[in-house]
Image (tube, grey):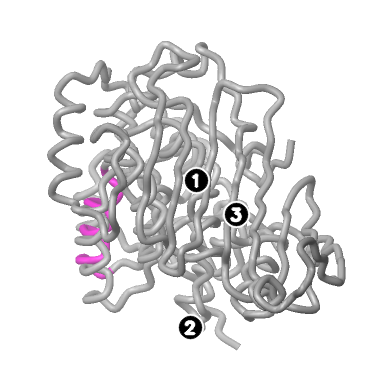
Amino acid sequence: MCTCSIKTAIVGIGNMGSAHAQCIFEGKIEGMTLSEVCDINTERLNKFAQEHPGVDIYESFDEMLEKGNADAVIIAVPHRFHSDFAEKALTKGRHVLVEKPADVSVSNVIRANKVAEKSGKVYAIMFNQRTNPLFAKAREILKSGELGELKSTTWIITNWFRTQSYYNSGGWRATWAGEGGGVLLNQAPHQLDLWQWICGMPDSVTAFCDVGLYHDIEVEDNAKIITKYKNGAQGVFITSTGEYPGTNRLEVMCDKGKLVLENGILKQWKLSKATSEVCHTSEKSFDGIPFEYSEHNPEGTETGHMGILKNFTNAILYGEELISPGSDGIYELTLSNAAYMSQWKNNAEIKLPLDTAEFDMLLSEKVKTSKYICDESKSESNKQYSERWKVRWE
């Protein structure tokens, strides 16, 4: 049995980074210790040092990579720096776990993925909601083929209600230059990732992204994505930060049945015959198909951030398969990038793979007129993981 310990550094000890740091410092992740942290906020950094003796502190990420002795780096800086920081750490021989989303632009993620592959190091992304047993079960059922081909899928995820005060709490929030997007880039990445993880990636995206529909912001707070898949299936993804009470409901319709995830339960209908078969062989104008109905309650618990940290550690120490490989970050970001491009091009259908050069050009135009205020160093710190970061059904 290996008794090794992965010395881990965290860059960015604001909102998410401080929660990761506290978790590791308290010894909650077997096989991982906290060796050093980096942040641009000197006051916060010094306070952290006082409360966490033995942990080295750095104000410069480059200096930490040169002088530090960490085996792995957790990246919890603003979205637009994720790929750059990941590349630097991987190039310096560190394993890397990056917070979601992978970046604000798919072109940056493509570059980081290439560096990660060449490095041979473990590269993961914090898609912690993949640890929820209901989503894992839905994926297992669909991948098994027992329900046949995908026909349609709809995810309504509107339980993100935010006030104007939330958006006013930081000048970087809800800006193209600061955050890189709105509800699709901040609140919904987990669901966009789970959507493609369960149902697969589509061939095209059409979207309607409403800028400041409910709030005084420069990015979208309400969005609808329409997808088309290679076999002709279609999907709809609806999300908002301006509705209350919200909904979290995923429905997946297939040729031999359907799945519905809502209120913490996975419901399954399994048909005795495929709808395509009955449609073309039945002599009845209106026909029904016998089915088996079952409900799947969670088997085990959602291990969340700690589950991903433990999996990341085990992947380094024992070669355990990653739950959320860093390279997977490209998929959900492709969906949100394509949605933005569709909106910017008069709601046009955007074929995938994405034209990253065109997207970057269009995004740069938005950044030029952004009202971004550089105050990321003022973000809050946490000593534990917030309940709002787990799967919420209401």
**Between 366 and 391, which is closer to the camera in this rendering?**
366
Residue 109 placed where, x, y %? Answer: 27, 56
Give the residue type that dot 1 points to.
Pro
Q: CA distance from mark 1 to mark 3?
A: 32 Å
Please rate how many residues cluster around mark 3, counting C-alpha atoms within 10 Å: few if below 14, some from 14 to 19, many from 20. many
Check disc 3 and report its element: helix, strand or loop: helix
Residue 77 placed where, x, y %? Answer: 35, 41
Which residue is found at the position 29% from the left and 28% from the top?
Answer: 178
Residue 245 placed where, x, y %? Answer: 71, 25
Residue 131 figure quarter: bottom right
210 shown above or below 259: above
Asked if residue 57 shows in the view, the reply is no
Which residue is found at the position 46% from the left and 14% from the top?
Answer: 215
* Residue denoted by label 2: 319
Which residue is found at the position 64% from the left and 37% from the top?
Answer: 388
Q: CA distance from mark 2 to mark 1?
A: 31 Å
Give the residue type that dot 3 points to.
Gln
Label 1 vs 3, first from the N-terminus? 1
Q: Residue furthest bottom?
A: 1
Q: Is residue 69 left or right of residue 282?
A: left
Asked if residue 376 shows in the view, the reply is yes
Label 2 vs 1, first from the N-terminus? 1
Image depth: mark 2 or mark 1 in front = 2
Work out which quarter of the rendered image holds the N terminus and state it.
bottom right
- Residue 53, numbered circle: 1
Give the extent of the magenta segment: 81-93
**Between 52 and 149, which is closer to the camera in this rendering?**
149
351 shown above or below 49: below
- Residue 129, numbered circle: 3
